[in-house]
Amino acid sequence: MEITAKMVKELRDKTNAGMMDCKKALTESGGDFEKAVTYLREKGIARAASKAGRTTSEGIIASYIHPGDKLGVMVEINCETDFVARTDDFRSFAKDVAMQIAATGPLAVTREEMDSELLRKEKEIYRQQALNEGKPEKIIDKIVDGKVEKYYSEVCLMEQPFVKDNEKTITDVINEVIAKLGENISIRRFTRFRLGE
């Protein structure tokens, strides 16, 4: 199948990937648009993984105040250079992350940062629930593990579904931004304020 400039432009508009990357993705997928999108996403993730070890000492602190002025968020997002920190793409991503935190109220950036005591209590609750439901002892640990994974996806920012596109997690979105900007990016910390809390 012939890959036309129009097809390449459509894919570029949808994914923000480079022209040559879009052309290669369409060629590899035989002109199938959805397969080409998947190809680019997978490639972006691979590109992001190759940058993961690089130091992120620049960046910005973004904020979001919810209409009504009763909920606010500040988040520190780091990148490798001041140049990238000033780009519209980086700033837009930072605003999206601040809005995500306001909307979902995560407890930590990653599962490694979760409070171990809180996690222990959650596991006890899940175990007791399974026992109360009369589940066999041999499968209770699997049930608890499944519920803990679901809990992580609710309270760990990097594992949450993105509020603007719940087909992606925050990790997927950050990997796309890394692939687009060519630098490692990390969400360092955040604070969520609610009036009266």
Image (tube, rainbow, N blue to C red):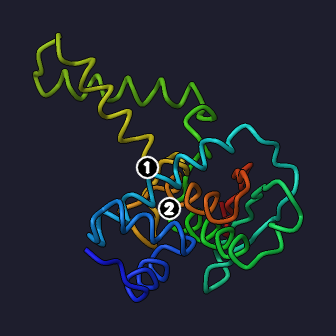
Quarter of the picture holding the N terminus: bottom left
141 up-or-down from 64: above or below: above
Q: Residue at x 63, y 35 (%)?
A: 113
Badge 2 element? helix
Q: Quadrant of residue 142?
A: top left
Q: Nearer the viewer, residue 55 or 70?
A: 55
Classify residue 167 as left or right of residue 13.
Answer: left
Horizontal and vertical percent for residue 2? 30, 78
Check contact, mark 2 vs mark 1: CB within 8 A: yes
78 up-or-down from 111: above or below: below
Horizontal and vertical percent for residue 185? 71, 53
Looking at the rendered structure, the kind of residue marked 2 is Thr
Q: Residue at x 55, y 52 (%)?
A: 106
Res 154 label: 1
Q: Which residue is mark 2?
A: 104
Q: Nearer the viewer, residue 125 or 184?
A: 184
Q: Quadrant of residue 50?
A: top right
Q: Residue at x 64, y 70 (%)?
A: 93
Point out the tag, 2 or 1, that comes first from the N-terminus.
Answer: 2
